[in-house]
Each structure stands twice: as C-alpha cells, then as structure tokens.
C-alpha cells in the first residue's frame, strides 16, 4: 500500500495539486511518485514493548484525546468485549491494516501506518461502575484543587480514556472513528479534544518542538536513556496494584494560553518568564539548548540569571524534591472566543509512575508562584491509569478485569 520513494518532484520539493501543471521550468505530473518515504511507512508496535505505545513514542503531528463513560447497566462482560474490540482495532490500524470484518471506513486507504498509536486508560469512576473498587489504585486519588483552576467538569475525567496520535491527519481521524464505532452501545463519548504538533520533516533537522507561545518545549524532559527514566515514568514490576506493573499514570490538562497578553510582552520579558531563550531554547544561565540549567548563576549585576519565578526554576526537580514527569503534549486551537482571543493552548499530558511524585507537587508549586501561570488557564483535567501493553492474544486491561 505504500507508494514508491521520492522521484524528481520530491527532490525538488514541489507539490502540485489537480492536473499536471508547470512550476517554473519543471513539469510535475499528477501521478508522479510522491515522497511518502519514512513518514507514512513508519509503524509502532501495539505490543512491542511492555508498555503501551504513545508514551515514549516520538511526538506525532496529530492527536485526538477521547473520554468515554460506560453506558448505564453495562456489565463486566460487555466491558471486556469492548476492550477486546478496541485492542484488536488498535493493533490492526497501528500495523497499517484496515479494520477487520469489513467494518473499515476507508478513510486511511492509500496511507501507511504513519506512526499511529492508540493508548487506553481507566479513570477513577471506571472502578465503581464495574464493581472493581477493590482494585482501584491509590495513585488514582482525585487530583487536588489548584487555586487558579477554572475546570469544566463536562470536559474533565471520564471512565475510559483513549489517546490517538499519528503523523497524518486522515490516519488519526480514521482511528478516532474506528474507536468511536467500536464503542457501540457499551460506552458513550464524554469529551473529545484535538491537537497537533510539528510535522516530521518540517524542519531541516529533528528538533525539540515549539508550543503556541513560540517556546522550544520539551528540552528538559526525562530521556529513555536516563538511568532513572523507567522508575520515574513506569510502575515497577513489583509495584502496586499488580495489574498496573509496567503501566503509567497520565495527567491530562487542557491549558488555554492567554496569547493576546503573551504576544504583547517584549522578547526579554517572555524569556524571563520561562528562563530560556526563545530562539534556541538555551537557558538564560548560558550555553546551548541542552546545557544543564544553572539555577545559582548570577548576572554581572548580581541578580539571578534565571529569575525566582521563572517557569524552569519553579518546575525543576531540584525545586520539588526530585519530582519529575514525562511531558508529551499536543497543541490545540479551537477557534476564537467571543472577545476575539484565540481558544488555543496546550493539551498537556504528563506521564509518571505516581502522580504524587510527578504532576501534583510540581503543579502545587507552579500554582503558587510561577511567572508563566499568569498567562495560562487550566480549563479541563483528567487522571487515568494506563495499564501495560497486553500480551499476544490478550487485550488491554485483562489483568484488571479477569
Ligand atoms: C519546562 C512551557 C505547563 C512542568 C518547560 C519549558 C517550557 C515550558 C517552554 C522549558 C523547556 C523544557 O524543558 O521543556 C510550558 C507551557 C505550559 C507548561 C507553555 C502550559 C501551557 C507545565 C505544567 C507543568 C510543567 C502544568 C507541571 C505541572 C514543566 C517541567 C519542566 C518544564 C517539569 C522542566 C523543568 C526543568 O527541569 O528544567 N515548560 N509549561 N509545565 N515544564 Fe512547563
């Protein structure tokens, strides 16, 4: 199903829609091979590693987040059948195959798997609905209220959570539609959010992405090669509850950015708020993007190079007894509000082995004294237990449900 690799049209970087046309001196035929190359062809394995996909997978260009509530009266058997359907669909679509049983909508025909990932999680309310409160993880305790929260309960929480990511918009929508149709009568959509990131190949070399404030965002994330990465992000093999061993907890926050106020700040003020240079993400204590941040560094005038309320200082593990999380967000834009301000920001997703040692203490601190918080509104929130990847032949969450 994959097209051939780049021909002359791809090498020249030209894309011509419609009938064959002349661009400059070069004629590009409509049926010329297109440079689908690695973007469409890349696939992620649904069961490849002990963990579900979409956590350490490189950030994708498109994302959909969905939360479902179980329909009233749905019993455990129907929940198991739903998770079997969802797991089978995720596995096929991630391999670039159509949905089975003639159910496929055709939306992703012609496209490769495009790094599609589908990730499933359970919200706190799931356990009461399914008679499984005895297996409710302690880590799923409700997140505390933060003083600046303006949360919309209709767009928060939910029994089941699905994260879809792909490097192609049609491939991502295809998965969304399949997941929604598979839900059938067992679960009803509670909320949905759509996001995006930079497309692979849009920059001359792979780089940390930017958010809608224009900042390089993701530099100081824990890296899979770090010795403490697994301990920070995944529940250990002997962790509790046993069904979450190898799983992770996802904190999801819809954070609107007050872009009109932000974009009117001088570059100098913007950089001070974060503590990093906007152009290349280098810390204001010196060096390049990847130079460790020096929180003690003073300017020649004797003030802190990274201000007391700079986001990177307040959020750093050093300021939070080592608390750390893997941030893997999507940007979003849902049009404009009545006052003309963009309804845009970050679908912030933080992954950690325990939210009490990741998101919660850091957000408590940011909520109290972070220079960036003045330009943000947390509008929706969710916390989900994301179990490990299923064994071959099994489905996501089996160790919880059977
Ligand atoms: C770092 C932006 C919300 C935790 C950063 C950086 C930027 C940034 C530009 C510096 C580059 C990097 O290391 O990634 C934002 C924006 C936010 C937001 C635009 C909201 C829209 C949050 C929230 C948390 C958080 C809600 C956690 C509760 C962190 C952490 C770091 C960081 C832990 C790394 C600090 C370090 O160790 O240097 N953020 N952030 N951020 N942010 Fe945020």
Image: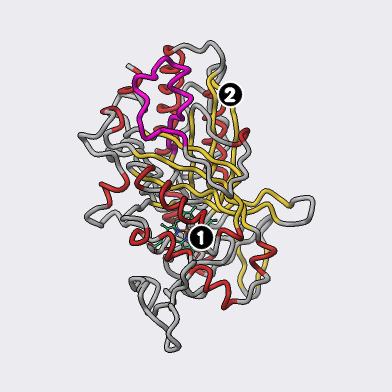
Spot occupied by residue 167 in the image (x, y as percentages of width and height): 49, 50
In depth, the one of 26 and 175 nearer the eye is: 175
Q: Which residue is mark 2?
A: 188
| Quadrant in the picture for residue 185 | top right
Which residue appears at 57% of the width and 46% of the height? Answer: 254
Which residue appears at 62% of the width and 57% of the height? Answer: 257
- Which SS class for mark 2? strand
Nearest-to-viewer mark from 2 and 1: 1
Work out whether mark 2 precedes mark 1 in sequence or the reverse, and give the earlier one: 2
What range is drawn magenta here?
118-142
Q: Which residue is mark 1?
A: 369
| Residue 337 magenta-highlighted | no
Spot occupied by residue 44 in the image (x, y as percentages of width and height): 37, 44
**Any part of residue 34 in sight:** no
Determine which of the numbered discs, if any, sits on residue 1 in the image.
Answer: none
In the image, taking residue 150 as reference, residue 336 lies left or right, namely: right
Q: Say above or below: 70 vs 112.
A: above
Q: Say above or below: 16 vs 159.
A: below
Looking at this rendering, what residue extends furthest in the bottom direction? 300
């Amino acid at each position: 199903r994959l097209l051939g690799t780049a021909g002359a049209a791809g090498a020249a970087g030209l894309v011509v829609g419609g009938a064959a046309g002349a661009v400059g001196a070069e004629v590009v035929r409509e049926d010329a091979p297109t440079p689908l190359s690695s973007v469409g062809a890349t696939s992620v394995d649904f069961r490849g590693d002990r963990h579900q996909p979409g956590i350490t997978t490189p950030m994708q260009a498109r994302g959909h987040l969905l939360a479902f509530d179980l329909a009233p009266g749905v019993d455990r058997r129907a929940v198991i059948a739903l998770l079997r359907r969802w797991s089978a669909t995720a596995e096929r679509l991630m391999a670039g195959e159509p949905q089975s049983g003639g159910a496929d909508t055709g939306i992703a025909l012609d496209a490769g798997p495009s790094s599609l990932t589908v990730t499933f999680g359970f919200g706190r309310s799931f356990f009461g609905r399914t008679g499984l409160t005895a297996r409710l993880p302690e880590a799923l305790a409700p997140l505390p209220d933060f003083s600046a929260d303006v949360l919309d309960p209709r767009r928060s929480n939910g029994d089941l959570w699905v994260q879809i990511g792909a490097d192609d918009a049609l491939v991502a929508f295809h998965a969304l539609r399949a997941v929604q149709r598979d839900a059938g009568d067992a679960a009803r959509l509670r909320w949905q959010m759509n996001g995006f990131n930079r497309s692979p190949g849009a920059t001359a070399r792979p780089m940390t992405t930017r958010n809608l404030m224009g900042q390089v965002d993701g530099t100081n994330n824990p890296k899979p090669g770090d010795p403490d990465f697994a301990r920070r992000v995944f529940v250990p093999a002997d962790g509790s509850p046993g069904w979450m061993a190898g799983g992770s907890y996802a904190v999801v926050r819809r954070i609107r950015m007050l872009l009109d106020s932000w974009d009117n700040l001088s570059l100098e003020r913007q950089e001070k708020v974060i503590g990093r240079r906007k152009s290349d993400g280098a810390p204001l204590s010196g060096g390049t993007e990847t130079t460790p941040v020096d929180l003690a560094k003073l300017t020649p005038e004797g003030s802190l190079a990274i201000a007391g309320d700079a986001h990177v200082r307040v959020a750093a593990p050093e300021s939070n007894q080592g608390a750390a999380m893997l941030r893997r967000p999507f940007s979003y834009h849902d049009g404009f509000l009545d006052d003309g301000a963009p309804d845009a920001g970050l679908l912030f997703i933080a992954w950690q082995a325990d939210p009490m040692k990741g998101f919660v203490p850091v957000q408590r601190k940011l909520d109290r004294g972070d220079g960036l918080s003045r330009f943000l509104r947390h509008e929706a929130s969710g916390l989900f237990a994301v179990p490990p990847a299923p064994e071959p032949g099994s489905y996501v969450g089996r160790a919880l449900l059977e």
